Amino acid sequence: MPESDGKHKLFSISDSGSKSLDEINGSIQVPENAGFWRKLFTYTGPGILIAVGYMDPGNWITSIAGGASFKYTLLSVVLLSSLIAMLLQAMAARMGIVTGKDLAQLTRDRTSKKVGFMLWVVTELAIMATDVAEIIGSGIALELLFKIPLIVGILITSLDVLLLLLLMKLGFRKIEAIVATLVAVILLVFSYEVALSNPNIKELLAGYIPAPQIVTNKSMLYLALGIVGATVMPHDLYLGSSISQTRAVDRRDHKAVKEAIRFTTIDSNVQLTLAFVVNSLLLVLGAALFFGTNSSLGRFVDLFNALSNSQIVGAIASPILSMLFAVALLASGQSSTITGTLSGQIIMEGFIHLRMPLWAQRLITRLMSVLPVLIFAIYYKGNEAKIENLLTFSQVFLSVALPFAIIPLVLFTSDKKLMGPFVNRAWVKYTAWFITVVLIGLNVYLIIQTLQTVL
């Protein structure tokens, strides 16, 4: 059924052959007779939107707590997690470029209508869970920066739908540039704070070598599993398979497809390396400032206060450090908001073929995410610790949704009929399946441990 005129209907059912993110699909032209660097610049952008998911507010406390508890030992886990992310995101991008469909569309094409609807519900919950972290992070950042009551801050974050609508009208390259700017703010803030903390470089580098105690120490193992289990976000795999198609590529031209895969993979790996640096900085900051202090670092507010407390972080303590931390937190929340919105549109159109104006889709998704946070904020007014506990539950939802994204991804990219000459090589296929089993196992373990702790 063809798409109806958006002026007359709030939503419509699209045909299964619709392009992923139709308004920006193939919207960026690639120069034909250009050099390496010019082409790389043209393909640079989607990777930074992907990388945002690996450094959103939901990952911050885990990384800093890892450093505060075990110094630099868990840096090796951060490195391993980043390598896993690079492999899976490269597979997702390659699938999108080769097939012209995103992960949600391909999964829906190979399932029934009922199964497709179920998968949409699960994945929508995962995006809502991601939104919860963004809402809490942004709301607390506004409270810390401008003394805005948390409830009001949460309501303000629900208005970011207007921001995204404006950005979409400016073009996809503008969105990429704005997200890159926000990520640069995060990188600069933590680079500055880590430099001031004067970490032990020799011990820091040694932390990237896996240590036996990570497995033998139960507390360390749990934190390590938390870092790995929260690294691969299911919505990022859907997003990566879609925005890799924003560059205009002739899929009938084997050379053009191969070139697109090459440059997109470079972009993805470079940006995920940036995410790896940010996560490393977070852990190093936790180690350099808080290791051995017995400080309570379970919340964003604790971290904010600690950075200005000379009894905890020593002579470098300063209100400026605390404010920079809050600025970075706000930048992280807002950049994650943009990618969450795009992911929501992808899974809605892909799984249930429901096309809806972006403002309506974003408003519905955002309200569904804001409501539980708002209810908690009102009920536990003045108790941010209780509100931030929602972050724990959000990670459980992400863990539940992960198999529904990662298993189809490995299956599709290993399908010779679907991928042709771009099918997974043997080592990629078996490595991906090994990673899949390990990640699912870790997430099941984390879910069990979390429920035991809560109950």
Image: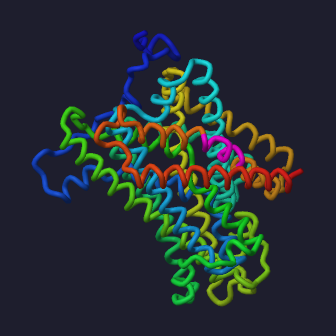
Q: Position of residue 100 (x, y in %)?
A: 34, 32
Give the overall secondary structure of the magenta segment. helix
Q: Position of residue 51 (x, y in %)?
A: 47, 55
Residue 309, above or below 159: below
Is residue 454 left or right of 418 when viewed as pictured? right
Is residue 54 left or right of 62 when viewed as pictured? left
Residue 306, above or below 87: below
Asked where in the image residue 26 lies, by quadrant, the reply is top left
Q: Quadrant of the N terminus?
A: top left
| Residue drawn at the location 66% of the way across and 82% of the way down | 289
Residue 20 is covered by the magenta coloring: no
Question: How are the residues colored?
Answer: rainbow
- The range drawn in magenta is 396-403
Q: Nearer the viewer, residue 114 or 53?
A: 114
| Residue drawn at the location 49% of the way across and 75% of the way down | 191
Looking at this rendering, what residue extends furthest in the left direction?
A: 33
Asked where in the image residue 326 lies, by quadrant, the reply is bottom right
Q: Position of residue 11 (x, y in %)?
A: 52, 17
Judge whether residue 17 can be spotted in this image.
yes
Q: Position of residue 455 (x, y in %)?
A: 89, 50
Q: Nearer the viewer, residue 263 or 367?
A: 263
Residue 280, above or below 6: below
Is residue 142 left or right of 87 when viewed as pictured? right
Residue 398 is covered by the magenta coloring: yes
| Residue drawn at the location 53% of the way across and 52% of the way down | 53
Judge whether residue 338 can be spotted in this image.
no
| Residue drawn at the location 65% of the way across and 34% of the way down | 122
